[in-house]
Image (cartoon, grey):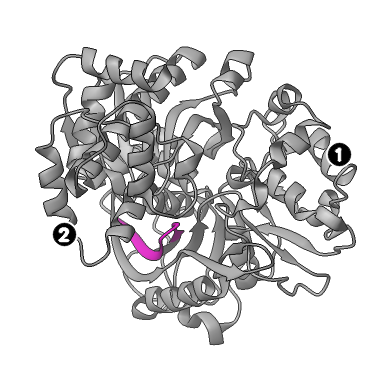
């Protein structure tokens, strides 16, 4: 391990910008004695902003507020150390900003939960059948995939004359920081526009956008770069303060790609749950799986760090509980609520968290009651019962996804690692162990930031080695908690039969 240094004294300090669907964070990390020490130096809110339009609201991201939070966070990160050794940005996937020919932003990025993509996959499949698209991009069909967003945005030829750039969220922020336009591969692979074998833009998918939909995709999309690429130095000292001059590293800029780097696995036979607003459940492979069985099961092949493939399914995640908390209002004591939920009888009511009704913002408790009534179940009676329903249902979805990921890929699974915010939810982790029937290891909670920091450190020469070496650092740096499965499998099997008919 070499000893890269910041412009100040002491160990090199790296800064991870980690943007989630409900908040953004800037977290610093330094390596000492083979361990990574992290500190959150800034946190700022994030979320959908509904703006009235003809006929319906449009959901946007407030990208300028996010950018302001990033700048402030980088200034705070750098100032005590006189600079930074490197910076990396990760965020959610699929959403993008459009720049005109003068690099000016053409409006706020539209939120992936916006309703504009309703019916867009079907319109695209008229020109490139779903099976043919899956054979190229290996991607789970989600209405918000970027390819479908662009098809929806193209109505009336609105994008045909655009002469500028399309940049995914981390790459857009990176462009504003460095002036360099790139598309980092792990995030680009979620767009539906990447050939997962060639790790390059997919001609068949670009042809569909450019032909029937009139989207000048080849003109808009920048060059692809692998995670670990040094993009360029941060500019504008007036904006970033002492962080100016630090190299921006294209980390695994899809937050799940960074989170999977931070799985403290000692064996390749693991499954992961990257648990936050979304839950990404799967296994790590060396090559994609694009069988018809995989497509029918709606599994996705997203590209990962060091040439890996993240073979996974998107599960709705803690979003459902977050929306319940928002609807209930006030200052809900989550710890007390989870304690009450733990006392509710197991599997009293379960819902399919991937049902489309749970995707948009809204009255989630009412939607849960509606689902329960439609499936012949007694609806949850109160907040604790609703919370238990959500967590039981998430564990049930994890059970199915882990089992299918193993069966479809041929990868044996001996342990399930939970990283991200859900690692702090002891009840969810215990239920996951019971549902899957395997040990669950929880932590680190800031998995995306940890993976982000380690890829940076390796890119600038502070650490060496492959994923196993990075994961050894995570294991040595993280206090994890292990949950062993308990109780019979039969109740989970019955709940699964209920939801699957």
Q: Residue at 68% of width from left, 39% of height from top? A: 192
Residue 23 among magenta residues = yes
Q: Residue at 58% of width from left, 36% of height from top? A: 303
The residue singled out by tag 1 in the image is 207
Q: Residues within 10 Å of mark 1 (few under 14, many from 20)?
A: some
User: In the rendered image, which quarter is residue 188 located in?
Assistant: top right
The residue singled out by tag 2 in the image is 333
User: In the rendered image, which quarter is residue 415 located in?
Assistant: top left
Tell whether 319 sits left or right of 436. right
Q: In the picture shown, does residue 462 fall above or below 500?
A: below
Residue 133 percent location from the top left of the image: 73, 28
User: What element does badge 2 sit on?
Assistant: loop
Which residue is at the front of the view, 221 or 248? 221
Tell whether 414 sits left or right of 210. left
Marks 2, 1: nearer the viewer = 2
Residue 375 percent location from the top left of the image: 37, 27
Residue 170 percent location from the top left of the image: 57, 59
How many callouts does the rendering have?
2
**Visible residue check, residue 225:** no
Task: Determine the main secondary structure of the stretch shown in magenta.
Answer: strand
Q: Residue at 83% of width from left, 60% of height from top? A: 158
Which residue is at the front of the view, 185 or 249? 185
User: What element does badge 1 sit on?
Assistant: helix
Q: Residues within 10 Å of mark 2 (few under 14, many from 20)?
A: few
Q: In the picture shown, does residue 121 fall above or below 112?
A: above
Q: Are marks 2 and 1 in contact (CB under 8 Å)?
A: no
Which label sits on residue 85?
none
**Dot 2 or dot 1, earlier in sequence:** 1
Q: In the picture shown, does residue 367 fall above or below 495?
A: below
The residue stretch that appears in magenta: 18-31
Residue 467 among magenta residues = no
């Amino acid at each position: 391990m070499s000893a890269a240094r910041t412009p100040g004294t002491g160990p090199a300090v790296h800064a991870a910008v980690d943007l989630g669907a409900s908040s953004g964070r800037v977290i610093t990390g330094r390596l000492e004695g083979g361990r990574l020490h992290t500190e959150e130096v800034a946190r700022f809110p994030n979320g959908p902003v509904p703006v009235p339009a003809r006929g319906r609201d449009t959901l946007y991201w407030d990208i300028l507020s996010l950018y302001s939070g990033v700048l402030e966070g980088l200034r705070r990160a750098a100032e005590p150390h006189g600079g930074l050794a490197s910076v990396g940005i990760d965020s959610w996937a699929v959403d993008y900003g459009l720049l005109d020919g003068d690099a000016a932003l053409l409006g706020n990025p539209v939120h992936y939960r916006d309703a504009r993509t309703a019916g867009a996959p079907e319109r695209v499949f008229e020109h490139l059948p779903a099976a043919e698209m899956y054979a190229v991009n290996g991607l789970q069909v989600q209405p918000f995939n970027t390819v479908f967003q662009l098809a929806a945005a193209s109505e009336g030829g609105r994008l045909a004359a655009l002469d500028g750039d399309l940049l995914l969220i981390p790459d857009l922020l990176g462009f504003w920081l460095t002036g360099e336009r790139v598309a980092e591969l792990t995030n680009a692979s979620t767009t539906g526009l990447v050939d997962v074998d060639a790790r390059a833009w997919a001609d068949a998918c670009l042809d569909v956008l450019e032909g029937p939909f009139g989207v000048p995709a080849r003109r808009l999309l920048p060059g692809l770069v692998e995670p670990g690429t040094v993009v360029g130095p941060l500019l504008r000292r007036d904006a970033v303060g002492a962080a100016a001059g630090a190299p921006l590293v294209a980390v695994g800029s899809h937050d799940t790609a960074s989170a999977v780097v931070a799985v403290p696995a000692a064996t390749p036979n693991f499954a992961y749950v990257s648990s936050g607003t979304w839950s990404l459940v799967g296994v790590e492979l060396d090559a994609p799986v694009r069988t018809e069985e995989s497509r029918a099961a709606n599994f996705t092949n997203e590209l990962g760090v060091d040439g890996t493939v993240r073979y996974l399914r998107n599960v709705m995640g803690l979003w459902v509980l977050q929306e319940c908390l928002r609807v209930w209002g006030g200052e809900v004591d989550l710890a007390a609520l989870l304690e009450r939920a733990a006392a509710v009888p197991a599997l009293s009511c379960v819902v399919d968290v991937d049902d489309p009704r749970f995707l948009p913002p809204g009255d989630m408790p009412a939607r849960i009651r509606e689902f329960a009534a439609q499936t012949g179940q007694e609806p949850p009676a109160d907040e604790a019962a609703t919370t238990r329903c959500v967590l039981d249902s998430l564990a049930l979805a994890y059970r199915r996804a882990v089992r299918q990921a193993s069966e479809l890929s041929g990868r044996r699974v001996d342990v399930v690692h939970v990283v991200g915010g859900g690692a702090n939810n002891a009840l969810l982790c215990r239920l996951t162990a019971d549902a899957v029937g395997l040990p669950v290891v929880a932590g680190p909670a800031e998995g995306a930031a940890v993976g982000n920091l380690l890829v940076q450190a390796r890119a600038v020469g502070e650490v060496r080695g492959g994923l196993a070496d990075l994961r050894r650092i995570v294991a040595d740096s993280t206090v994890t908690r292990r949950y062993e499965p308990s109780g019979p499998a039969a109740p989970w099997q019955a709940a699964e039969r209920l939801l699957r008919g």
